[in-house]
């Protein structure tokens, strides 16, 4: 009986291109022998299920499909049944029916144990890859990147060829592996401080993967400067979440001035308080009109007509407000450094 089943199993293994002499070949031989012996003797099923769970793990490690072992088991059961039926003095029909039901339920249990082992190994492998890639990302974004040999070894372990340049992306959410797969282009990802951080050799593949998310794409930098891109993208996402930068997929290089103003909490507020102090004694309505006019005038490089056009108001109104601003700010409106401070302060409020 066992020899017939083994012969059928080995034939199926050859058709699948498997080695009959390797670890899995020996494992399947032991599995078949144990399965047949357990079924015939009615012994405790637990050790056999454990054996097939380990065979399922080996299936994954050797790169086979999850259903390949089930097909071999089904063929083995069919061979067992055919051999049983053809033997002299075979069982009576009622006994045959109950034996058939028990046999195929048994095979389902073995296949289920193998599938569970396969999936356990797959999950473990995914966790291992995630840990290796998290370690690599952490090495790249730390303040002092490690020496080249250490970095190269970490990249090899993570199966990630080090690119010449990389951009860091901070994304709202913690589904790092999903986002890395969606981004493609060799992206790797991990979760740091409650957000997904991707490293991507090229930002060109990111838009579709990040649609409908808050995300900040850092600048493309040399690989050993990955921390710079990471810090910029991280701060940009924080400013998005605080409604200080636009929602959606944000390219950090397009928002460097707001990023600069919002980089260190409190600094922009302090700049605004000092630069705009001459307006402290003005009523709220007058202050709003004066700050709006001053920002338009600065943007238009001190030209009244373009400023009036931007404000949708009469040039005389702008001139009147500018006289009031000169009374308040004096020579500051003619000093390049103070004008820059005013411009930045007005952008920050």
Image: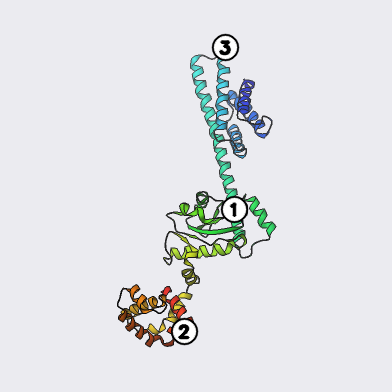
Depth check, front residue: 119 or 289: 289
Q: Are marks 1 and 3 in contact (CB under 8 Å)?
A: no
- What label does residue 335 carry, if any? 2
Which circle, 1 or 2, is nearer the viewer? 2
Dot 3 surroundings within 10 Å: few (below 14), some, or many (20 or more)?
A: few
Q: Position of residue 69 (x, y in %)?
A: 57, 31
Q: Position of residue 29 (x, y in %)?
A: 65, 28
N-term-proximal mark, 1 vs 3 = 3
Which circle, 1 or 3, is nearer the viewer? 1
Quarter the N terminus occupies? top right
Label 3, secondary structure: give it.
loop
Which circle, 3 or 2, is nearer the viewer? 2
In whole angstroms, how far apart are the C-alphas of marks 1 and 3?
62 Å
Q: Position of residue 275 (x, y in %)?
A: 44, 81
Residue picked out by circle 3: 89
Q: Position of residue 6 (x, y in %)?
A: 63, 24
In whole angstroms, how far apart are the C-alphas of marks 1 and 2?
52 Å
Depth check, front residue: 9 or 319: 319
Q: Are marks 3 and 2 in contact (CB under 8 Å)?
A: no
Residue picked out by circle 1: 133
Depth check, front residue: 129 or 170: 170
Quarter the C terminus occupies? bottom left
Q: Are marks 1 and 2 in contact (CB under 8 Å)?
A: no
In whole angstroms, how far apart are the C-alphas of marks 3 and 2?
111 Å
């Amino acid at each position: 009986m066992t020899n017939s089943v083994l012969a059928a199993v080995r034939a199926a293994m050859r058709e699948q291109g498997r080695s009959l002499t390797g670890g899995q070949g020996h494992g399947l031989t032991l599995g078949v022998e144990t399965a047949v012996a357990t079924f015939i003797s009615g012994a405790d099923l637990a050790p056999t299920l454990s054996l097939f769970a380990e065979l399922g793990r080996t299936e994954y490690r050797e790169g086979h499909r999850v259903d390949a072992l089930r097909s071999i088991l089904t063929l083995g059961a069919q061979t067992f049944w055919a051999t049983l039926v053809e033997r002299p003095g075979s069982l009576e029909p009622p006994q045959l029916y109950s034996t058939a039901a028990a046999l195929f339920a048994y095979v389902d249990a073995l296949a289920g144990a193998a599938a569970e082992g396969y999936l356990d190994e797959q999950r473990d492998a995914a966790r291992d890859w995630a840990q290796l890639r998290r370690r690599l990302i952490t090495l790249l974004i730390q303040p002092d990147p490690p020496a080249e040999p250490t970095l190269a070894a970490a990249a090899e372990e993570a199966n990630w060829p080090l690119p010449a340049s990389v951009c860091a992306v901070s994304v709202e959410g913690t589904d790092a592996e999903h986002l890395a797969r969606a981004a493609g282009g060799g992206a790797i990802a991990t979760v740091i401080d409650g957000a997904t951080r991707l490293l991507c050799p090229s930002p060109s593949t990111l838009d579709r993967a990040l649609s409908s998310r808050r995300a900040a794409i850092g600048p493309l930098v040399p690989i050993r400067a990955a921390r710079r891109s990471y810090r910029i993208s991280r701060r940009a996402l924080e400013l998005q979440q605080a409604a200080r930068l636009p929602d959606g997929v944000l390219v950090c290089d397009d928002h460097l001035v707001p990023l600069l103003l919002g980089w260190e909490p409190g600094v922009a507020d302090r700049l605004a308080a000092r630069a705009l102090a001459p307006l402290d004694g003005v009523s709220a309505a007058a202050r709003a009109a004066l700050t709006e006019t001053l920002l338009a005038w600065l943007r238009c490089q001190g030209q009244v007509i373009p400023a009036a056009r931007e404000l949708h108001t009469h040039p005389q109104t702008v001139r009147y407000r500018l006289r009031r601003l000169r009374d308040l700010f004096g020579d500051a409106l003619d000093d390049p450094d103070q004008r820059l401070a005013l411009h930045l302060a007005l952008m920050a409020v």
